Amino acid sequence: MINRLLVICGLLLLGSCAEDPIPKPRAYLRLDYPKPEYVGVQPDLPFRFERNIQADSLGPVEISRDGKSKGVNLVYPDLKGTIYLTYKAINDNLQMYLIDAQNLTQKHTLKADEIIEQPYVDEQNRVFGMFYEVGGNAASQSQFYVTDSTDHFITGSLYFYTKPNYDSILPAAYYLRNDIQHLMETIRWKKN
């Protein structure tokens, strides 16, 4: 009887020393992307650049309803994302275009954890701009603009075809951030 009681007490003590169960965090897929390979692109616009071969080739240039802007899209089907590029001729509207580009990025502050600004200056090729990295569950994780400050103005935005969940799209957002930065670095204005 005493031996049985000691065994039961021992089991109770042994069982009570176990750690409390801790819920496991959600797991996300680990995604590895191929090393980027870039090719030159010359859309029917006054600039050219290099794009990653992971993006579908550019479709036709789309013209806005008011005729003041033109756009092309870089679609990444495997990453379920698109970089939207919009071109506008400056026509003495540079200040207005800069304000519009900055306001578009600031609209994401409601959902963004942070917005990091990275100026871009290429004096030799007259390409000046700003890259915005948007952290958190915002609709767009990267935005930018570039200009020559006299004739040309380009804005770009990255959007994914999914509800924003920063943790799950982070690998793709980083991969495309690097593509956007390469795109900015390779923009060259075409001679009129």
Image: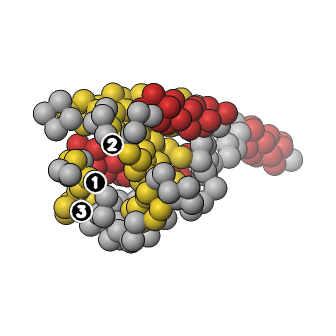
Q: Which residue is mark 3?
A: 42
The image position of residue 138, as x and y in percent, is 60, 42
Instruction: Determine which residue is flagged by label 2.
Output: 152
Identified by mark 3, the residue type is: Gln
Residue 29 shows up from this direction: no
Q: Earlier in the sequence, mark 2 or mark 3?
A: 3
Three-letter amino acid code at the position of disc 2 = His
Q: Earlier in the sequence, mark 1 or mark 2?
A: 1
Query: Residue at the left extreme?
Result: 124
| Residue pointed to by mark 1 | 46
Residue projecting furthest to the right: 1
Q: Which structural element holds mark 3? A: loop
Q: Quadrant of residue 133?
A: top left
Other residues around mark 2 within 10 Å, as few (<14) / some (14–19) / many (≥20): some
Give left or right: position of 85 versus 109: left
Percent of width and height locating residue 105: 54, 36
Q: Residues within 10 Å of mark 1 (few under 14, many from 20)?
A: some
Residue shown at 26% from the left, 53% from the top: 47
Give the CA distance from mark 2 to mark 3: 15 Å
- Cβ–Cβ under 8 Å for marks 1 and 2: yes
